[in-house]
Amino acid sequence: MANFGFRRLSIVAPFAVNWMEAKSAVGAPDLLREAKVFETLADAVRSCNLVVGTGSLDRRKPEQAILGLPEAAAQVRHALSAERIDRNRIALVFGSEKHGLTSDDLSWCHALIVIDTSEAQPSMNLGQAVAVCLYELSRTNFDGQAHSGLGTSPVLEIDPKEGHQNPTSGQLDRLAELIEETMAAANYTTRGMRSANGEAMRVLLRRLMPNDADLRRMMGLFRRILWQFDKKTGKN
């Protein structure tokens, strides 16, 4: 990260012993000291309006848009141009060294970036994958400013219509929770399936990419439906 001018590092549920021993890095001790630690990925990306995962396709079939790294990097630079940077907060997410991003991790992502590698060995070492991605993001039109790692998708609207903003991950999660609550009130699904449905709902909302006005309408609709269910069952 220090090599390529990136400063905003967030760590999710690190192995405590290794993380506490990571006291220094050549040329980057401040980056480690200033890193933020979160218990969950949802907490780490809550303020972001675009979240992009990384990984290979050898063991997964993601529902999200799949982007080649050069294409994703070009769109990131566009999203972070001077006139757009104040309204876009974007996160690039890497999984653990052992197993990468899980399907649950990917449910918080709008898209997946894939690095072209040999078919005989599609998996990359974590540190190498980070270096390749950050190099590609910074290699052209880099303005020297410190940004988070980032990405977008050709099927997503990174610059919504004038007067609207893309919702943050936290706002989408609140809508997903409201929809899940409504589904439970309607007996749409069994308790055992609620976790899987929650994951599917997170993916769906990120594929739809509603703007802030859409989000308010949807929140209002499901609140009204839930109020009607509660009214019939005497909960209010």
Image (spheres, rainbow, N blue to C red):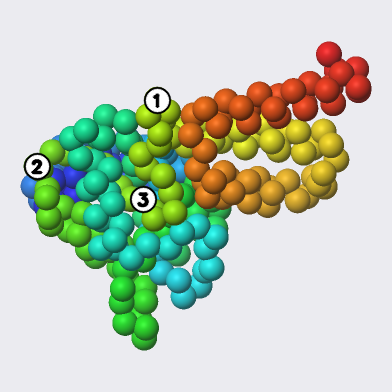
Helix, strand or loop status at disc 2:
loop
Q: For mark 3, what is the residue?
A: 152
Q: Is residue 146 above or below residue 196?
A: above
User: Looking at the rendered structure, which numbered label has been put on residue 144?
Assistant: 2
Q: Earlier in the sequence, mark 2 or mark 1?
A: 2
Q: Amino acid at mark 2?
A: Gly
The image quadrant that residue 120 belongs to is bottom left
Alpha carbon separation for disc pair 2 and 3: 21 Å
Query: How many residues crowd around disc 2 within 10 Å: few (fewer than 14), some, or many (20 or more)?
Result: few
Which residue is more in the foreground, 11 or 67?
Answer: 67
Q: Is residue 17 visible?
A: no
Question: Element under label 3?
Answer: loop
Q: Residues within 10 Å of mark 1 (few under 14, many from 20)?
A: few
- 57 vs 10, left or right, is right
User: Cα distance, mark 2 to mark 1?
Assistant: 29 Å
Q: Residue at x 57, y 25 (%)?
A: 216
Instruction: From the top left corner, tell me how far across and down residue 56 is, in percent.
Output: 41, 69
Answer left or right for 135 relative to 144. right
Residue 17: image tag: none
Instruction: Tell me if mark 3 has few (under 14), some (14-19) or many (20+) residues whose alpha carbon lies within 10 angstroms of its own.
Output: many
- Coordinates of residue 44 in the picture (x, y in percent): 41, 38
Mark 1: secondary structure: loop
Residue 104: image location, x then y, percent: 55, 53
Residue lying at 10% horizontally and 43% vertically, measured from the top left: 143
Nearer the observer: mark 1 or 3; the answer is 1
Q: What's the residue type where badge 3 is placed?
A: Thr
**Residue underneath mark 1:** 163
